[in-house]
Amino acid sequence: MAREERRFEIGYGLLPKKENSFIRESLVNQAKSRGIDLVKIDRGRPLVEQGPFHCVLHKLYGEDWRSQLEDFRSRNPNAVIIDSPDAIERLHNRISMLQVVSELKIENQSETFGIPKQIVIYDQETLFDNQAWELLKFPVIAKPLVADGSAKSHKMSLVFNHDGLNKLKPPIVLQEFVNHGGVIFKVYVVGEYVKCVKRKSLPDVSEEKLKSLEGSLSFSQVSNLATHEKSDDKYYKKMHLEDTELPPQSFMTDIARGLRRAMKLNLFNFDVIRDTRFGNRYLIIDINYFPGYAKMPGYETVLTDFFCDIVNRKERDVVVERGLVVECSQEKVAGTDGRSVLSCEEEVRKTVTNSCCSDGEDKENSIQV
Ligand SMILES: Nc1ncnc2c1ncn2[C@@H]1O[C@H](COP(=O)(O)OP(=O)(O)OP(=O)(O)O)[C@@H](O)[C@H]1O
Ligand SMILES: O=P(O)(O)O[C@H]1[C@H](OP(=O)(O)O)[C@@H](OP(=O)(O)O)[C@@H](O)[C@@H](O)[C@@H]1OP(=O)(O)O
Ligand SMILES: [Mg+2]
Ligand SMILES: [Mg+2]
């Protein structure tokens, strides 16, 4: 006798721009075909009155939203919130964002990683204080300290010399500009899934060129420009993205998994550049929460797989790859708010079968919510 299909509801809270790019019909349909209904959260009504959702997916800020999530969590202790506002908050400050990279330990003989030299400047006086400059060398990139998703938080300046400092408005982070061959790598993380892609970046600045450059140059979201915006530009015509080799996948995966565990986040990307002075040195310059996944080929499948894992309370790394279900209680794996996806041994032991995400067959290891 055919078993009734179990369905799950995932509520999403996104700004209109994100909703437009992420919630495509192709994603909604694929999720639906595998037992997941993506439902828009009505921001005009309390979250607790909606659903009931098995999972909440969000990229919204502010105190009101935080307290709505808190209420939701206490009333729905079994629901999963992807991800916790506290964990996301770390990415709203460009210093705390990269601190986690500096603390990460990864064993690798052939490649190294880190972050560029940087200082934080809170006021105008410190900007012109020579002591602050002992560590850094021009050119530098001035980035707003706050990275809250506003247009302002993406406005950057490439500063060539002291004259260029006049226009800057602290609080800012001054980060050494590192020549990297004009190509940036964006590493997308969706739970355990890791995908690295190439994008165009700022061109290198030679010592020679630096002498002739005046002041500073402003720019914003250079790796996100539409193709037509780049195509007229002489520089971009000269660029050969296809000639650039990707960093080793296993190295990027190790960094991604390390970051995921340390930050307790499931949905993020990080920007990596390869220092041209040392072909095997990689620098992480930016980490973004819930980035533009729709730019990833086949994002619908990747995201649907992830949703299925979440609602089934199972993760590939623990349940499938290692096959050791009990490890969940010992491993600090990226948690979510509400209940950690992998935190509790008892939950994992509640092994039942259900039809969500199965390809027609029941899976012995799936966990029911
Ligand atoms: N230290 C650096 N050295 C060389 N280039 C850099 C450095 N920092 C940033 N860039 C360039 O400037 C761009 C913007 O910087 P960053 O990624 O920090 O800004 P963002 O506004 O947070 O970007 P996103 O749109 O990815 O959120 C990068 O994509 C890269 O092209
Ligand atoms: O739409 P959103 O506001 O989430 O924009 C994000 C943007 O995704 P989009 O492509 O969907 O616009 C991301 O692009 P990719 O790194 O994936 O290229 C990146 O620029 C994030 O920094 C942005 O987030 P913010 O920093 O502004 O919060
Ligand atoms: Mg970036
Ligand atoms: Mg960013």
Image (spheres, rainbow, N blue to C red):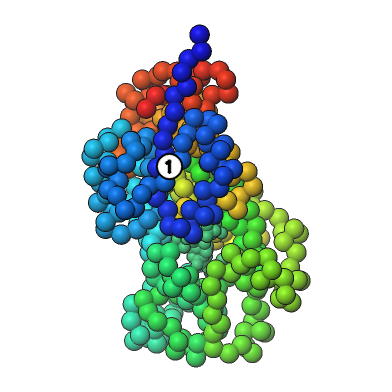
Under circle 1, the secondary element is: strand
x 67%, y 53%: residue: 246
> Residue placed farthest to the top in the image?
1
x 38%, y 68%: residue: 146
**Viewer-proximal residue among 122 and 353:** 353
Q: Compared to 368, does 50 lie above or below?
A: below
x 64%, y 47%: residue: 297
**Viewer-proximal residue among 243 and 208:** 243
- Residue 35 in sight from this viewpoint: yes
- Judging by the rendered image, the residue that carries numbered circle 1 is 39
- When asked about the image quadrant of residue 48, the answer is top left
Which quadrant of the figure contains the C terminus? top left
**Viewer-proximal residue among 282 and 186:** 186
Q: Compared to 256, does 175 lie above or below?
A: below
- When asked about the image quadrant of residue 113, the answer is bottom right
Residue 356 x %, y %: 49, 26
Residue 31 x %, y %: 52, 36
x 46%, y 48%: residue: 267
Amino acid type of the residue that numbered disc 1 sits on in the rendered structure: Val
